[in-house]
Amino acid sequence: MNATPDTVTSGGAAGLAAIAAAPAAAVFGFDFDGTLAPIVENPEDARAHPGAPAALARLAAVAGAVVIVTGRPAAKAVEYGDLAGIDGLVVLGQYGRERWESGTLTVPEPPPGVAEARAKLPDLLKAAGAPDGVTIEDKGLALAVHTRRAAEPQVALDRLRGLLEALAERTGLAVEPGRFVLELRPPGMDKGRALRAFLAERGTPSAVLFAGDDLGDLAAFDALDALRGEGVPTVKVCSGSAEVTELAERADVVVDGPAGVVAFLGTLPGA
């Protein structure tokens, strides 16, 4: 995998050319975990790649907009990414339900189903004989069940999937799969919808780039495909890993994890 622009598809090359021609009208979007921050066993230990904050700051100084769209709570992404000092950066957390901008955090009330799932989830996992290493991450607006620290992460994930889907159905939530994680969250919002809503605020961009690594980022890729069909140049960047291949199959550029994303940002105009 390579981080240089000469590895892009023809559509991605057109997007990069549009960015180079008018960077001040381009929008750059990023996932957080797995894209700007390496994946770690404990989500609370996640931190942005050392070069990411400076790279984003340089980009924000010349871009039309820079936005992070993450399943993580927005405040956590800002803290773990050391992002608070980046002028103009917007962070959309919980798949776009939360917003952090200029130091102000907006968080909606969670739907009742989240509280119900929170109360039932520990007993459900215990009754299911969830193996050691399976953990619950409470995101406030959502609940994530991680299996990465189990002896057989994929086996544990497959074993729990049906039970979590049933709980989600009973509580009016949706199940979002990811890299050794299943998240129960309110339906009706995804990264594609969040990105399109953000773009609607900004007017028609000269180009849109989005970088992601996990299944939840496919919705953002769908949004970029739709934009490309509407005549807006786009660039889909995959932070590649052996754990998820679906994004790489659809990306214009595939780089080697967060380090590759940071290196790629260094090739963009003004960086």
Image (tube, helix red, strand yellow):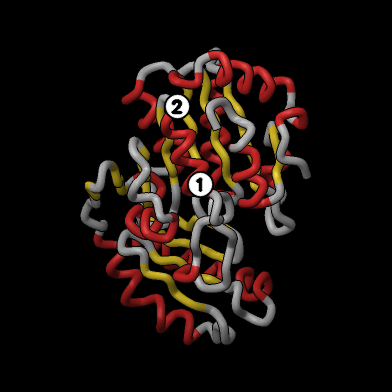
224 relative position to 173: left or right: right
For label 2, the residue is: 62
Task: Report which quarter residue 134 is drawn in.
Answer: bottom right
Q: Is residue 225 visible?
A: no
Numbered label tally: 2
Between 83 and 169, the residue placed more toward the observer is: 83
- Please state which amino acid type lies under the numbered disc 2: Val
What is the distance, in whole Å, between disc 1 and disc 2 at their CAs?
Answer: 20 Å
Q: Check the image and report above or below for 151 versus 45.
A: below
Residue beneath the point at 34% across and 35% down: 88
222 relative position to 106: left or right: right
Residue beneath the point at 37% across and 61% down: 142
Residue 38, percent from left and from top:
59, 59
Q: Check the image and report above or below for 246 versus 49.
A: above
For label 1, the residue is: 31
Residue beneath the point at 40% across and 38% down: 194
- Please state which amino acid type lies under the numbered disc 1: Asp
